[in-house]
Image (spheres, rainbow, N blue to C red):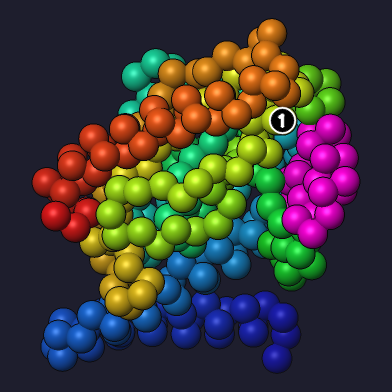
């Protein structure tokens, strides 16, 4: 069988298994089957969009628009996931903060579903940071490398600082923004809470003298609860806060900056999660 044949067979199996599992879930009233169906759909969408991203990154680099690679791939993932899972993130950017460029964008990190959040939020000319081990994941790693991901070696402070220094230079030379999850890991929270923030994103913003744009995602534990193996469709509200300027600040100001931004984000998280509760997205 040719490569195209294998891909076609795999795609057919996926498209058949997803509605089959949903049908079984409705008959047996077993939420774990819906969890399985949407999980298969999500990982399949991620794989195929990563493949698309590799091709798009190569083409965009060749024509001088490499900075758009993650934006176009993120949008492809957004619409693929909406089609296959019925999940989307509705963005409220009332201050026009997503037009700020370059900047350091930061957001709360609840689960693997936040990859979809990036697909809905990402403005053009933005890239993520990621742990260096992801560089070696097939297709995803190649896409991230080609699309200007900032890889961070978390086991080496000197290597991490060097990566941030290079990122600061790139942000100005190519007007490229960076998205970072300051909690450093997924919280899997079923309440509107934040883990303590790490300071890397704030040091980068101060070093580059660019604004910080906070992104606050409502708690969505009724859409995805990994621990309880539930995965439902739904629309998750997202608030984009006002940009926080860092011009004139130094490394001595970072602690106060972290405290201020985390406080603002925590307050907005509580507010927007109450909206999500009324919509059935978060647990009451």
The residue located at (77%, 50%) in the rendering is 152
- Does 158 lie within the magenta span? yes
33 relative to 179, above or below: below
- Tell me if residue 227 comes above or below residue 89 in the rendering: below
- Write the residue at 16% across / 49% down: 277
Horizontal arrangement in the rendering, residue 34 relative to residue 215 (left or right): left
7 relative position to 99: left or right: right
Q: How many marks?
A: 1
Give the image location of residue 67, x and y in percent. Answer: 72, 34
Residue located 69% across and 8% down the image: 248
46 displayed left or right of 237: right
The residue tagged with tag 1: helix, strand or loop?
A: helix
- Residue 55 visible, this orientation: no
Q: Dot 1 corresponds to which residue?
A: 204
113 or 259, nearer to the observer: 259
Q: Residues within 10 Å of mark 1 (few under 14, many from 20)?
A: many
Residue 204 location, x and y as percent? 71, 30
Between 11 and 203, the one nearer to me in the picture: 203
Say if the magenta span includes residue 24: no
Where residue 97 appears, as percent x and y from the top left, is: 47, 20
Extreme residue in the top direction: 248
Res. 50 in view: yes
The x, y position of residue 165, in whole percent, is 84, 32
Magenta region:
144-167
| Apparent side of residue 153 relative to residue 125 in the rendered image (left or right) | right
To which quarter of the image does residue 37 belong?
Answer: bottom left
Q: Residue at x 42, y 73 (%)?
A: 39
In what quadrant of the picture does the N terminus appear? bottom right
Q: Where is 166 relative to 117, above or below?
A: above
The quarter of the rendered structure image containing the C terminus is: bottom left
Q: Quadrant of residue 221?
A: bottom left
| Residue toward you, 3 or 189 | 189
């Amino acid at each position: 069988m040719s490569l195209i044949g294998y891909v076609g067979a795999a795609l057919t199996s996926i498209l058949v298994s997803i509605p089959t599992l949903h049908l079984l879930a409705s008959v047996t009233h077993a939420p774990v089957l819906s969890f399985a169906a949407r999980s298969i759909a999500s990982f399949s969408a991620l794989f195929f969009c990563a493949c698309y991203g590799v091709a798009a990154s190569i083409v965009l680099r060749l024509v001088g628009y490499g900075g758009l690679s993650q934006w176009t791939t993120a949008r492809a993932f957004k619409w693929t996931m909406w089609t296959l899972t019925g999940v989307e993130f509705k963005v409220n950017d009332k201050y026009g903060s997503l037009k700020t460029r370059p900047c350091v964008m930061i957001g709360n990190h609840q689960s693997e579903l936040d990859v979809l959040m990036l697909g809905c939020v990402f403005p053009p000319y933005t890239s993520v940071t990621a742990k260096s081990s992801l560089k070696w994941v097939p297709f995803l790693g190649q896409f991230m490398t080609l699309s200007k991901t900032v890889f961070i070696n978390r086991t080496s402070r000197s290597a991490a600082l060097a990566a941030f220094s290079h990122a600061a230079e790139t942000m100005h030379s190519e007007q490229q923004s960076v998205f970072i999850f300051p909690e450093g890991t997924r919280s899997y929270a079923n309440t509107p809470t934040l883990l303590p923030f790490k300071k890397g994103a704030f040091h980068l913003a101060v070093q580059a003298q660019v604004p910080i744009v906070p992104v606050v995602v409502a708690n969505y534990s009724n859409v995805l609860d990994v621990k309880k193996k539930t995965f439902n469709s739904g629309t998750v509200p997202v608030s984009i806060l006002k940009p926080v300027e860092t011009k004139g600040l130094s490394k001595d100001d970072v602690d106060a900056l972290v405290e201020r931004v985390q406080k603002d984000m925590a307050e907005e998280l509580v507010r927007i999660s109450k909206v999500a509760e009324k919509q059935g997205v978060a647990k009451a």
